[in-house]
Amino acid sequence: MASDLNFFFEVLIGGLLSGVMYSLVALGFVLIYKASGVFNFAQGSMVLFAALTFVGIMEMGVPFWPALLLALIVMMLLAVGIERVVLRPLVNQPQISLFMATIGLSYLLEGLGQGLWGTEVRALDLGIEDLPNEWIQENLSLQISTFDIFSAASAAALVGLLALFFNKTKVGLALRAVADDHQAALAVGIPLQHVWAIVWAAAGLVALVAGMLWGSRLGVQFSLSLVALKALPVLILGGFTSVAGAIVGGLIIGASEKLAEVYIGTFTGGAIAAVENWFPYMLALLFLLVRPQGLFGEKIIERV
Amino acid sequence: MLYRESGQFKTSYPADQAIFPIRQDRIALSLLLIAAFIVVPLVADEYWLGSILTPLLVLSLAAIGLNILTGYAGQLSLGTAGFMAVGAFAAYNLNLRLPELPLIVDFLLAGVCAAAVGMVFGLPSLRIKGFYLAVATLAAQFFIEWVFTHVGWFTNYSSSGVISAPPMTVFGLSVDTAVEKYLLTLVMVAVLALAAKNMVRSRIGRSWMAVRDRDVSAEVIGIPLLKTKLSAFGISSFYCGVAGALWTYCYLGTVEPAAFDLARSFQVLFMIIIGGVGSILGSFLGAGFIVLLPILLNNIAAMIGHGTLQADTMANLEHIIFGGLIIFFLIVEPHGLARLWQIAKEKLRLWPFPY
Amino acid sequence: MSGSSHSKVIGDVILKCDNISLSFGGVRALTNISIDVREHEVLAIIGPNGAGKSSMLNVINGVYHPQQGTVTYRGETRRAMKPHETAQHGIARTFQNIALFKGMSVLDNIMTGRYTKMKRNFLWQALYVGPNLKEEIEHREVCERVIDFLQIENIRKTPVGRLPYGLQKRVELGRALAAEPQLLLLDEPMAGMNVEEKEDMCRFILDVNDEFGTTIVLIEHDMGVVMAISDRVAVLDYGKKIADGPPEEVRANKDVIDAYLGVAH
């Protein structure tokens, strides 16, 4: 019986920890959506592109930290470039056009990234083992991966840093003003395009961290860009405009999909596998019907 | 100089409401149909018929389906391939389990099955809009793909998870060769395209566009939102479903659920963005563009002496070009090739005296 | 235009709003408002910005559902009715900010007004010829009469997005008229128009009222227009009704002068 309970906790905690990684990807979406009202479907491709760039630079013989810095610079330049070339000409277009443009962008980035750095699967070793942590195993007799703990911690640190940045600095204030109303922000003299550039650069940073963490777990390859698809239900659950929502949503999705995988899977005698591919979506869909604005999203009152 | 409408007066409302009110357009369309039905089967080889024209037509049909939903009714869907899969597997199972039904009926019923599934996944559209809805249709895409991969009944417990189209007969004629399959596809697509054009210029089409343009005033004028959106989901999915059945029966012959993955949904979406959102003609133009461009690229590569490109280089190049084109069209001409064609025609009507 | 000066007979109450209260979150938009509308009359609702005029129209045609109170239309009392249902009962309206279907032509916009009257299902429409074509033509003729009436024949095939503001307002009126409503709600039909356009619009409104006997409720800020065309005026202020009566009486009402009209200089 105890081992059953232990197993449950292992699944739960493993799910929560991987949920933090979903949150990390979702965070990239939220940042851009808040600042510019764009639902950036290409966030996943940015994750892939970042990981490919980082690995590619490392393969050229550059040591870890300089490579990280270089990759960061590339991602920020890319993000600013996207803002300038793709999104600025589409200002004032319907949101749905912007959304479709970012789908195009995601194709472009996937092609570009793989064209530049190659399509083969590359390993990315951050020096942390994806094995059960011994200390936890001895003291709590739970099997929790060290890597999960590490990545959750880095994600949490990044989220904390960004929250601090956006809540305590002048740029953060400008961002929140822009998020509320572009025109009003412009009218009081906030340089809209600087704010957008900063936000896109921040999204590039988030993509790089997510790319490294996911890349070292799954290998750096095309499927990294699919991680973004996992982040979408997180967004729906948490609301597109809420950083807290992205985090809580990520935890819920991470935990529930692992539990569903294990328990719905066993219910049906293992005949039904890969439940986690669609379970988060169904959960999000049901949730949408009850609360369309998400957990922490703002309710929109439509005026006629 | 040949393209003139002077002297052609419309004296009745039916004449004014014709699809092609200008005589030259009617002649051009007749020639095109003659070419498609008679000349192409005579001159095209098996490769062109079987590997290019047939899939082009089928994808045009799917693009019409998506265009009804996204272009006319304004509901973005990323689940097109999922609805195609429903059609494919429904047609297979209908044929398997009710062998007495004629093939065409199988196809149409497959479309009806897809329509039913589409309407279920369209239900959230009453509460949510825009990309929220797009994400909801992603749920449809993943769920449907998963069901057909993991529930053995749909593939008749085939160990490889693959379904194969049985030999086909239509009205006692066997449909076997590439030419016959092409013709069957062409007939289906031509009839359904005409039906789609008729719907979008009738009451239901106006109600779709009204909901797309201003949902509040649509409702105030008496258009029920849920019913209208569901009708768009249903009819759109019907088209996708029939396209899925044709994809299986007339093009591939053997399919697995992965043939209808998310990439296929995006492919069809790209077709309508490039071809023209809210245009039946645009669906064909977009499908033609997206099917033919890779072939053209390959030929260009061969011509400039690189031989044929490696598959993954080719795939990357395609990604870059399609992605770039999508962005380009959205910025420069959001109504796609169809609008360019329309502008060209308007210029031509006035040429060579534009004032 | 038609010069019809026959005295019209104002009939019984067809619409009765009883003690309507509406709030959004903590904001009270309407407080205990009761308004009657009688058949064939032109009722103007006036008041300062934010007085709740548009909210009142939205309650009448079902866009908003009031927390308290009832709406009785032709003897039928309802609490919550969807806008498309009120449309089926013969209520049509226009919006303060133009709410046309931007991607469609003038004719198609006006044809949507016929939606509730057309009956052929989508299979007939897919076939197009035959009964569906007959129906399309029938309704096209009705729409052409509206187009004729509003004198917009030359722009019938133009996408509405390309039209100037004044014409768009006219097309929006046309879309409402095509529904052949018994009760027509006009939300600031003359806002942002120049004098000439206002005169045209006034004439259209009076002609609709005269020729078809349509009951009209309109919101308008231009007091000259209100005095000229309305049979009765209701005044709202801060979500409450402060006056209701014939135009001259309302103009002389002290509360109304304080709240809205101000003192004449």
Image (cartoon, helix red, strand yellow):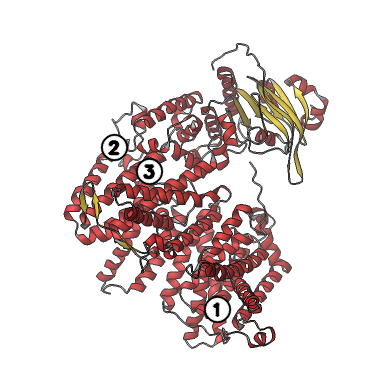
Q: Position of residue C1 (x, y in %)?
A: 54, 17
Q: In the image, are marks 3 and 2 on the same chain? A: yes
Which residue is pictured at 30% across the width and 32% down the height? B6
Q: In the image, are marks 1 and 2 on the same chain? A: no
> Counting other residues with Cα less than 10 Å from the Cα at mark 2, is it few (<14), some (14-19), or many (20 or more)?
some
Give whichever of C68, C246 is nearer the camera. Answer: C68
Which quadrant is home to the N terminus of chain B?
top left
Amino acid type, residue under disc 2 in the picture: Arg
Looking at the image, residue B162 lies above or below residue C162:
below
Task: Compare marks 3 and 2 and give the one earlier in the sequence.
Answer: 2
In terms of secondary structure, where does tag 2 sit?
loop
Q: Position of residue A19 (x, y in %)?
A: 61, 71
Q: Which chain does the numbered disc 3 sit on? A: B
Residue under label 2: B4
Question: Which residue is farthest left?
Answer: B42
Looking at the image, residue A61 lies above or below residue B228:
below
Amino acid type, residue under disc 1 in the picture: Met
Looking at the image, residue C103 lies above or below residue B154:
above
What label does residue A212 carry, if any?
A: 1
Question: Which residue is farthest front?
Answer: A1
Query: In front: mark 3 or mark 1?
Result: 3
What label does residue B196 carry, if any?
A: 3
Q: Which chain does the numbered disc 2 sit on? A: B
> Counting other residues with Cα less than 10 Å from the Cα at mark 3, is it few (<14), some (14-19), or many (20 or more)?
many
